[in-house]
Image: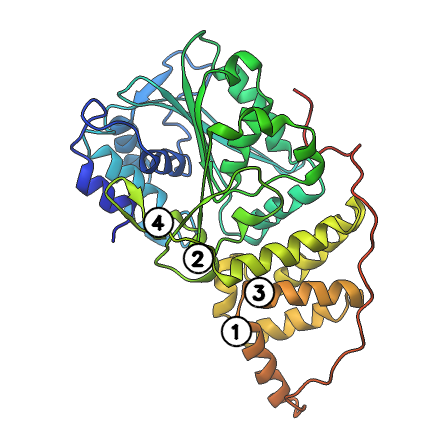
Amino acid sequence: MGNIIDYLDWRGDLTFSRDPFNQIDALLLSSLSYANFDGIVPGPDEPDGEVSLAEACERFFEMHSQEELDADKSFINWAPKVLLGMAGTDRFKNAVLKNYVNIVDQEKALQFSAVEIVTDDGVPFISFRGTDDTVAGWKEDFNLSFQTVPAEAVSVIYLNRMRKSPGTPVRIGGHSKGGHLAVCAGALCHRTIRDRIENIYDFDGPGFNQSFIRNGALDMISSRIRRVIPVSSVIGVLLGHTVEPLIVKSSANGLLQHNPMTWELVGTDFTNVPERGSTSTLFESTFNDWIESIDLPGREAFINDLFSVLEASGEKHLSRISDLGMKAYTAMFGKLNTLNPKTSDAVKSLLKILFDQWVERQEINIRKTLHLPLDEPDKEEKEEPSEDPVNDRNSPLPDS
């Protein structure tokens, strides 16, 4: 079994004229948008409007030392490796990069980045950047359950602006939030552009709330959505989807499966499995059932409570929380005890799903330290969650 870097070694010498575009190519192009192309790839209004992928790679490594890259411990620290691997292949080195946008506005809670990549077959690929594994980044994905994320509206504007040339086909895609933005932009862009979209690639991206799904915008593009998730997906099963996913095997465990570098493949195909793992299915039913049972203000309060507990750990990266010791767990446990009892039970259930045996292990440790009994007495029957329906007037996305 290999991953996307192995794919470049196996098939990088094959141009698109010899081997047509496939879903592994789409994942590579979706991953490429995680690289920081500030000062390297021209934006929409710059006179010298494009650069080859090989040249972009050369400039990137001139601007960023290996020491700097090695010091990056974030979830997306593999992006430069993908860029370097692609630049060394006949398949991708002559691809043209242009229309790079990178907007971060903390005041408006806006994080948006995208780049247009034209491969040798002449079809542009619009790659939307996703989130990293920071607690703040994951919270933005969860926030989709109750509010419009500003990047959604910007993704539609970007796609409408980039694809003005009549008759030209286009592919769009992204990983994580980038996959969600690709689907959002494809559904809400101008009809003349939507009709030219060949495929929309959604790699483990969160879905949409039921009010948006019911408005029918996704129905116009569902046949062209190519959705891929790992077997223990969490982000990719958030909220609702209209397309069944291809489920792929990962070399990692738990939350680390969100990293596309861990997805296994052979040749031009992912190594797929027939069904999702128990962690993914349990998380989907627990979170989505809870969210759909409460109104929008209740959702916001719940998400804030959930992430306040995670933030109490002091760790900025979600994937590293399970490596922390009792001090972090004690802080999280203390924060959990300040929440409303009904919310606290729901948050605790999700934490146990997300971090598997880690929560249980830390609970045992802290009970031993405090000389408490290890068998927790049965709790009183929980109050049922509110049956308040979702308010359809609060649609999460703007009208096209």
Q: Tags 1 and 2 in contact by the CB under 8 Å rule?
A: no
List x then y, in percent, for residue 144.
65, 42
Decide: few, some or many residues near mark 1? Use Cα within 10 Å; few <14, some 14-19, many ≥20.
few
Q: Name the residue that disc number 3 marks.
A: 353
Disc 1 to disc 4, how far (Cα)? 25 Å
Residue occupying image coordinates x 36% and y 34%: 26
Q: Secondary structure at mark 3?
A: helix
Q: Provide the residue designation for mark 2.
A: 256
Q: Residue at x 55, y 49 (%)?
A: 237
Q: Residues within 10 Å of mark 3 (few under 14, many from 20)?
A: many
Question: Nearer the N terminus, badge 1 or badge 2?
Answer: 2
Residue extending furthest toward the front: 274
Q: Is residue 391 toward the left or the right of residue 229 in the image?
A: right
Q: Residues within 10 Å of mark 4 (few under 14, many from 20)?
A: many
* The image quarter in which residue 100 lies: top left
Q: Is 37 drawn above or below residue 337 in the view shown?
A: above
**Amino acid beneath label 1:** Gln
Tell me the distance, in whole angstroms, between the alpha carbons under discs 3 and 2.
14 Å
**60 w.r.t. 166: above or below:** below
Residue type highlighted by circle 2: Leu
- The x and y percentages for residue 295 are 80, 46
Q: Is residue 161 above or below residue 357?
A: above
Which residue is label 4 attached to?
Answer: 261
Sequence-wise first label, 1 or 4: 4
> Circle 1 is placed at which residue position?
357
Residue 325 seen in render: yes
